[in-house]
Image (cartoon, grey):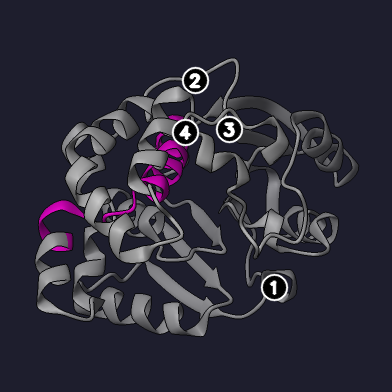
Amino acid sequence: MLSFFQFLKFGREQWRVQPNWARRVFVRLFGPLGVHAKIRNGRVVNAIVALDLPAKARALDAGCGHAYASFWLARRFPGWRIDAVENDHGLVAENREIAEDLHFRNLAFAGGEMSRFRATAPYNLIFSIDLLEHVPDDTGLLENFHRMLSPNGKLLLHLPRRHQEHRRIFPGFRRHTTPEHVRDEYTAPEISQKLRRSGFEVEYLRYGFSWRGELAFELNNLFWERPWLRVTLALLFHPLSIWLGYLDTRENYEDGNSLLILARKAT
């Protein structure tokens, strides 16, 4: 499980591609300012470490974004082979630059749509962090994941819970949505059914983003419609937000604003 200082600096590799010296210094010392990404990546990394995969495991980070989890896992498990796929070619270029600068030999980045990606060899693990809600044919993507896994291979998904079910703290966040989402996120029964139809057996479904994680997110994004004010207040509340976010990753909850699902490829 991530320690507090590992969580604090999660994603710090990104300092190398920041646009100005102030952001480079901050990210190098404290990791990126966004607590939300640290929470979801931290929860996924903790779940992956608990799987106790083989020393020579093959893993796929589907829709890696800034690849916080992949960089951390590549350093923690040097014997693994990790492929990370991202549709944003700008992010792919940045991640490749970081990987080259830091001499990661077990981590490779590829650009393109995840639904069209094909594995050169089966994976022991596929993990995906907040990707499915961006994909029109999510069932087709789950079926592609099924094809790319080895027998009894694992699929780990982190997903936002349907926003009508979210518990907000500050009233202004009740109208907060993500325009890039092509569907209204997920409910637990809905994603469980889609996984079973795609050939998976659900091993567990857990909730994240309890009141601690939600408060950390909201303090990190106050006045989210006014970028400069948002950043100023995010810096002011950062010590509290990062501590709340860290505490949120250390427990599983009976209710929360995100879903963490581990599924196994059915034989």
Q: Which residue corresponds to mark 3? A: 257
Answer with mark 3 or mark 4, whichever residue precedes in sequence. 4
Q: Quadrant of residue 66?
A: bottom left
- Of tags 2 and 4, which is closer to the observer? 4
Q: CA distance from mark 3 to mark 4?
A: 15 Å
Residue 68 horizontal/vertical position (percent): 36, 57
Looking at the image, which is closer to me, 145 or 124?
145
Secondary structure beneath dot 3 equals: loop
Secondary structure beneath dot 1 equals: loop
- Of tags 1 and 2, which is closer to the observer? 2
Q: Quadrant of residue 199?
A: top right
Q: In this orientation, does residue 78 appear?
A: no
Label of residue 170 in the image: 4
Q: Which residue corresponds to mark 1? A: 118
Q: CA distance from mark 2 to mark 3?
A: 12 Å
Q: Is residue 33 magenta?
A: yes
